[in-house]
Amino acid sequence: MQLVVVLAAIIVSQCAFAAGARHALLDVSLKDINGKTTSLKDFKGKVLLIVNVASQCGLTPQYIALEATYNKYQDKGLKVLGFPCNDFGAQEPGTNEEIKDFCSTKYKVSFPLFDKLHVKGSEQHPLYAALSGPSSPFPGDVKWNFGKFLVSRDGKILKRFEPEVKPDSAEVIEAIEAALAAK
């Protein structure tokens, strides 16, 4: 009987920890591309595809598929969130204004963009510490620009896709559709 009580306490504490981690992800303070303070709480109830982006990368054309995926699924509850990052080969050297202009002019990006941040290293932003840190279900440094994390409506990290996986690949679309179907 004592063993059952101990096991139940462990399970309850693990569930509470996981729920706290989800809420912690939603609570991380962010700045949008215009410098306004925000957090992922603004997107609670939406499925999120969080992507570190760069304007001068061989993978930059993924903006086309990101925008198409966003347009196809936004009415069903998907938000693509772009986080400019200069951590890999200095491929995002511009200011927020330059990044915003590039994305809207060259790729007609309409999904939300955020302040440039670090996804790895000593200056890693708390959002990416939560997404890729040791307590993440998908730990490990982000490897390059256009790494993607799929987050459920309640803030649970569901999947991680490496940079070379295209946003409109069957693997990503199936995961998005499954997350959208889970109410």
Image: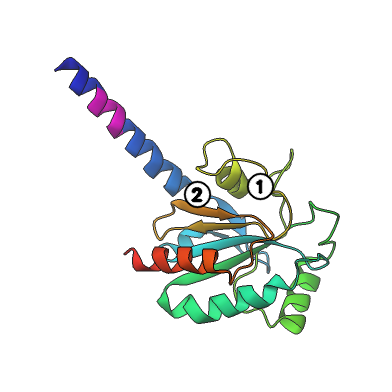
The residue that mark 1 highlights is 125
The part of the image, by quadrant, that contains residue 116 is: bottom right
**Nearest to N terminus: mark 2 or mark 1:** 2
Whether residue 133 is visible to the viewer of this picture, yes or no, is yes
Residue drawn at 56 percent across, 76 percent down: 69
Which amino acid is tagged 2? Leu
Q: Is residue 102 above or below residue 1?
A: below
The structure residue drawn at horizontal position 74% and vertical position 40%, both measured from the top left corner, is 121
- Magenta range is 7-12
Q: Give the main secondary structure, helix, strand or loop, of the magenta stretch.
A: helix
User: How does the figure colour the protein chain or chains?
Assistant: rainbow
Picture coordinates of residue 162 (x, y %)? 64, 55
> Would you place residue 153 above or below residue 126 in this image?
below
Picture quarter with the N terminus: top left
- Amino acid type at image mark 1: His
**SS class, disc 1:** loop
State the SS at label 2.
helix
Q: CA distance from mark 2 to mark 1?
A: 12 Å
Residue 101 position by quadrant = bottom right
Give the image location of residue 173, x and y in percent: 51, 69
Label 2 packing within 10 angstroms: few (<14), some (14-19), many (20+): many
Quadrant in which the C terminus is drawn: bottom left
Q: Is residue 16 left or right of residue 122?
A: left
Query: Does residue 61 lie above or below 30 as drawn?
Result: below
Q: Nearer the viewer, residue 43 or 175?
A: 175
Q: Which residue is mark 2?
A: 25
Foreground of the two, 55 or 58 = 58
